[in-house]
Image: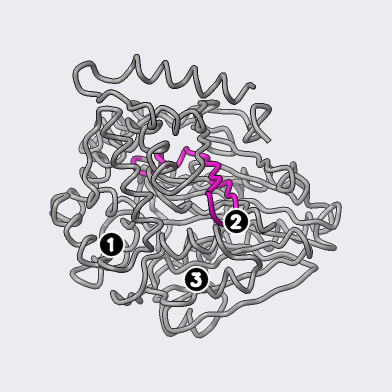
């Protein structure tokens, strides 16, 4: 009953709040699709429930988050034009060419539904633009550097771990993750989507803009799988003939019945984009795994006791030496420093890890290079904006980016379709965009696209309105 009331109330609000003279009238059929979906906003997050056939659930998402998708596209166009000198049309065409005949029919239809939903809500977008937004990681982070040069933008990063067996307080799985990137774009990953498809497994995931998959990658599936990842830093491989990561990752979440099958879907027709150290857990067997997926090489490890952590450093030697230009043991590097800090934290907390411990670890500010508490690019809770860049090997001084969130889940929570999420830094340090831009006027080009990151509490999703 609560879900029905929320869905009906939200539908009325949206119909009243769209731009007058722009939104198109809903048909009776479209209204019935929306009755099955709902949105709620809480503590900085957008929680979204969508369900049904591909076009229907796409329509629901496009309609209910039309404003956010529209803003995301505008910011993405602005940021990447600054870094590349190329306009949005250039990258939209590149995405269309790159992904032609490589996206599953089901997801083509879902994207078309998003376009239609946005149009009904009064926001115009083309299918090609929607395709680019889903594949922007493939295009901007992997295809473009191969074609021209690496963008000056911050490399993506994350801090994460998954633990099980004798490493945790109850012997079951605990998983934690925070997302790193520039704040202007990463602010659009404040969406938690509950997808109930007509075929395949239910998915509860954090997502980014209109991404079919997670993008930031924190998820629970109806097959009893949970997963997250950290991007492999300094990765150089890309195969334009492979399938885009958004297609493979979504199919893996929706259709894989176990860890091995999940890995097989990711490996098959891999294009190298979003080369990641994937951390996976099977709630039924208490087993955890790490799939390190490059382009030419990959490795899959599993265990039922212990921890896998991630800090954007790949452990597989073939991937590290053949496919990246990354360092492994220089703690001036922000990835290496976090790798070492994870080891220290696991030594301290091994056998006692639970969700509350995980939350505290995500807020950690110990810099192993400086050997003291000092929030910077080298801490688990990353703050490029506070890093003066003096340390050799730094990515620059006072860059507006870092860790923007925190997520934690345990076996028991995942079985109940729940997860903890915190929007903003896990450490509770605020980011004041106006104050930052006054202090660092070199970033005046981000005016209007950089926003505050206030302090928000840890929140359980989906919450009491849905199970």
Would you say 66 lies left or right of 360 here?
A: left
Q: Which mark is residue 160?
A: 2
Looking at the image, which residue is at 31% across and 50% down? 133
Residues at discs 2 and 1 in contact (Cβ within 8 Å) = no
Q: Earlier in the sequence, mark 3 or mark 1?
A: 1
Between 235 and 348, which is closer to the camera in this rendering? Answer: 235
Q: Secondary structure at mark 2?
A: strand
Q: Earlier in the sequence, mark 2 or mark 1?
A: 1
Of the two numbered discs 2 and 1 in the rendering, the one whose residue sits closer to the viewer: 1
Q: Position of residue 299 (x, y in %)?
A: 57, 80
Q: CA distance from mark 3 to mark 1?
A: 18 Å
Which image quarter is the C terminus in? top right
- Residue 37 seen by the camera: yes
Would you say 301 lies left or right of 114 here?
A: right
Looking at the image, which residue is at 44% across and 34% down? 33
Would you say 225 lies left or right of 356 here?
A: left
Q: Secondary structure at mark 1?
A: helix
Q: Position of residue 85 (x, y in %)?
A: 13, 54
Q: Position of residue 364 (x, y in %)?
A: 63, 46
- Residue 385 seen by the camera: no
Q: Is residue 198 magenta?
A: yes
Q: CA distance from mark 3 to mark 2?
A: 20 Å
Q: Residues within 10 Å of mark 3 (few under 14, many from 20)?
A: many
Residue at the disc numbered 1: 139
Between 55 and 158, which is closer to the camera in this rendering? Answer: 55
Q: Earlier in the sequence, mark 3 or mark 2?
A: 2
Residue at the disc numbered 3: 266
Q: Is residue 96 above or below residue 434?
A: below
Of the two numbered discs 3 and 2 in the rendering, the one whose residue sits closer to the viewer: 3
């Amino acid at each position: 009953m609560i879900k029905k009331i929320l869905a009906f109330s939200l539908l009325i609000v949206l119909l009243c709040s769209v731009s007058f003279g722009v939104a198109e009238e809903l048909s009776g059929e479209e209204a019935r699709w929306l009755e099955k979906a709902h949105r709620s906003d809480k503590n900085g997050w957008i929680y979204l429930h969508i369900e049904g056939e591909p076009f229907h659930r796409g329509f629901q998402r496009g309609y209910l988050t039309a404003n956010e998708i529209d803003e995301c596209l505008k910011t993405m166009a602005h940021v990447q034009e600054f870094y590349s000198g190329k306009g949005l049309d250039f990258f939209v065409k590149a995405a269309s060419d790159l992904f032609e005949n490589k996206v599953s029919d089901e997801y083509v239809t879902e994207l078309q539904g998003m376009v239609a939903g946005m149009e009904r809500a009064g926001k115009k977008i083309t299918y090609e633009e929607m395709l680019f937004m889903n594949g922007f990681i493939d295009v901007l982070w992997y295809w473009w550097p191969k074609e021209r040069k690496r963008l000056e933008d911050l490399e993506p990063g994350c801090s994460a771990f998954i633990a099980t067996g004798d490493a945790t307080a109850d012997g079951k799985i605990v998983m934690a993750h925070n997302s790193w990137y520039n704040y202007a774009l990463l602010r659009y990953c404040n969406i938690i989507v509950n997808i109930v498809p007509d075929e395949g497994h239910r998915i509860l995931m954090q997502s980014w803009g209109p991404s079919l998959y997670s993008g930031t990658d924190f998820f629970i599936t109806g097959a009893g799988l949970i997963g997250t990842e950290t991007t492999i830093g300094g990765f150089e491989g890309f195969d334009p003939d492979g399938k885009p990561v958004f297609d493979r990752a979504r199919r893996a979440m929706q259709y894989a019945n176990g860890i091995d099958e999940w890995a097989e879907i990711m490996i098959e027709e891999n294009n190298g984009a979003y080369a990641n150290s994937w951390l996976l857990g099977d709630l039924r067997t208490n087993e955890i795994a790490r799939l390190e997926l490059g382009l030419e090489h990959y490795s899959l490890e599993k265990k039922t006791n212990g921890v896998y952590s991630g800090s954007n450093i790949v452990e597989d030697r073939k991937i590290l030496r053949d496919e990246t230009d990354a360092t492994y043991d220089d703690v001036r590097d922000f990835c290496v420093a976090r790798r070492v800090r994870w080891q220290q934290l696991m030594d301290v907390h091994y056998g006692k890890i639970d969700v509350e411990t995980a939350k505290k670890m995500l807020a950690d500010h110990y810099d192993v290079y400086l050997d003291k508490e000092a929030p910077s690019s080298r801490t688990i809770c990353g703050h490029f904006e506070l890093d003066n860049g003096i340390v050799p090997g730094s990515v620059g001084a006072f860059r507006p980016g870092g860790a923007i969130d925190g997520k934690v889940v345990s076996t028991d929570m995942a079985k109940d379709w729940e997860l903890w999420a915190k929007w903003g830094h896990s450490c509770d340090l605020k980011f004041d965009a106006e104050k930052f831009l006054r202090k660092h006027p070199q970033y005046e080009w981000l005016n209007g696209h950089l926003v505050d990151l206030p302090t928000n509490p840890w929140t359980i999703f989906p919450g009491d309105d849905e199970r």
